[in-house]
Image: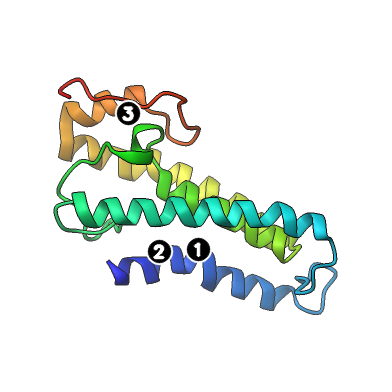
Amino acid sequence: MIKAIVILPGTALVYVPLLVVWLASGTAFAASFVPNLVVAWLAGLPFAAAGLVLMAWTVRLYAIKGGGGTPAPWQPIRNFIVLGPYRHVRNPMLIGVILFLVAEAALLQSIPIFLWMVAFVIINNFYFAVSEEPLLEKRFGQTYLDYKRNVPRWIPRLTPYTPPSS
């Protein structure tokens, strides 16, 4: 699990943003490590908190209910999870990462990090539609198809989904 976290969210939240900050340093797009705009900081902190909560919650669910495996595609979990945030949205882990990237962009007052977040959303939207969801359909069959039909990919539903067999 640690390897998957270091590689996947680590790349999106640490390694790429560090590269972006380094490449933008000395330009008009350089990150600001000083809270120039208190409003930006006040806006960023709730996004960071929400992102961390979602990421921690989903990792905990994977560890407890996943039946082994990780969030990584090279070592997927064995059990299909429809608990907690997964009852409202299909990709809560990624939503947590996206929220944290929004926070990084706001806290560092960095347009390049914001643009990285936009690219990250586009890349993942394509990846999920073309690769991950077809694999989940093969692995979990009708259970996943029912889930996919009832639970949105990115925008959470207000009422929690209850699988038909529950």
Residue 148 has which mark? Answer: 3
Q: Amino acid at mark 2?
A: Leu
Residue 46 position, x and y percent, is 62, 52
Q: Amino acid at mark 3?
A: Lys
Q: Residue at x 56, y 51 (%)?
A: 99
Quarter of the rendering containing residue 128 = top left
Residue 130 position, x and y percent, is 37, 40
Q: Residue at x 48, y 51 (%)?
A: 96
Q: Residue at x 42, y 29 (%)?
A: 152
Q: Amino acid at mark 1?
A: Ala
Residue 136 has which mark? Answer: none
Q: Which class describes the residues within 10 Å of circle 2: few (<14), some (14-19), or many (20+)?
A: some
> Does label 1 or label 3 sit earlier along the sequence?
1
Question: Gap in Å between the C-alphas at discs 1 and 2?
Answer: 7 Å
Question: Gap in Å between the C-alphas at discs 3 and 2?
Answer: 23 Å
Residue 12 has which mark? Answer: 1
Q: Using the image as rendered, state which of residue 158 and residue 129 is in the foreground.
A: 158
SS at badge 1: helix
Quarter of the rendering containing residue 30 = bottom right
> Does label 3 or label 2 sit earlier along the sequence?
2
Q: Residue furthest top?
A: 164
Residue 8 has which mark? Answer: 2
Residue 5 position, x and y percent, is 36, 66
Q: Which class describes the residues within 10 Å of circle 1: few (<14), some (14-19), or many (20+)?
A: many
